[in-house]
Image (cartoon, rainbow, N blue to C red):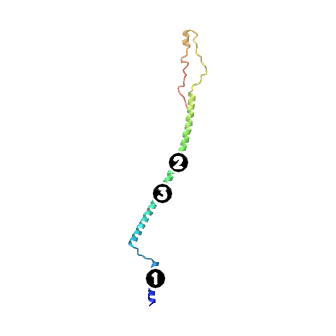
Amino acid sequence: MNRHPMRLITTVVGFSFTLGLVGCDYWPPALQAEIEQLRSETQTLSIEKIQLQAQVTDLSKTKQELQGQVDELSRINREKTGMITSLQNQLDAARARALKAMTPKAPLHKKTPVKPTMKAGTASRNAPKTPANKVQTPKAVGVR
């Protein structure tokens, strides 16, 4: 009689050990609902991750294009700045030449005013047609 309960215990322990190794397919309904919810959240998050990666890729391409445009505009700006500086120097030189051309030159012959020592009738013939203190200026200045 002693062997019978021992056999029963050995059978139960063996059966329990076998079930433990094989696993149990029974899941409580609350646990199954939670697992399904976590799976759906995981799928949703993976889809969002893929979409965000696509947006990051698009934005990085756009960034590279815009950086290229910025570099091009910077280069053009440097060129235009150089052109403006050159044109300003040319304008200053042209102004200096124009001012130099507009200044009255000293007359080659110094005319002395005629003193009326003769008769009054002859003095009006010898009088200059333009006043002595008026400076004649050129009518047009040509600049190349």
SS at mark 1 in the image: helix
Q: Is residue 56 above or below residue 114?
A: below
Is there a contact, CB below 8 Å, between mark 3 and mark 1?
A: no
> Whole-percent x and y of residue 23?
45, 77
Q: Mark 2 or 1 closer to N-term? A: 1
What's the residue at 56%, 33% (across, down)?
Answer: 94
Q: Quadrant of residue 26?
A: bottom left
Give the residue type that dot 3 points to: Val
How far apart are the alpha carbons under marks 2 and 3? Answer: 24 Å
User: Which amino acid is tagged 2?
Assistant: Glu
Q: Is 59 left or right of 29, judged from the image as shown?
A: right
Q: Which residue is mark 1?
A: 13
Q: Residues within 10 Å of mark 3 (few under 14, many from 20)?
A: few
Along the line of sight, which residue is nearer the eye, 23 or 72?
23
Which residue sits furthest front? 2
Please provide percent x and percent y for residue 53: 47, 59
Q: Secondary structure at mark 2?
A: helix
The CA distance from mark 3 to mark 1 is: 58 Å
Residue indicated by mark 3: 56
- In front: mark 2 or mark 1? 1
**Image height check: is 57 above or below 82?**
below
Tag 1: amino acid:
Val
Label 2 crowd bin: few (<14), some (14–19), many (20+), radius 10 Å: few
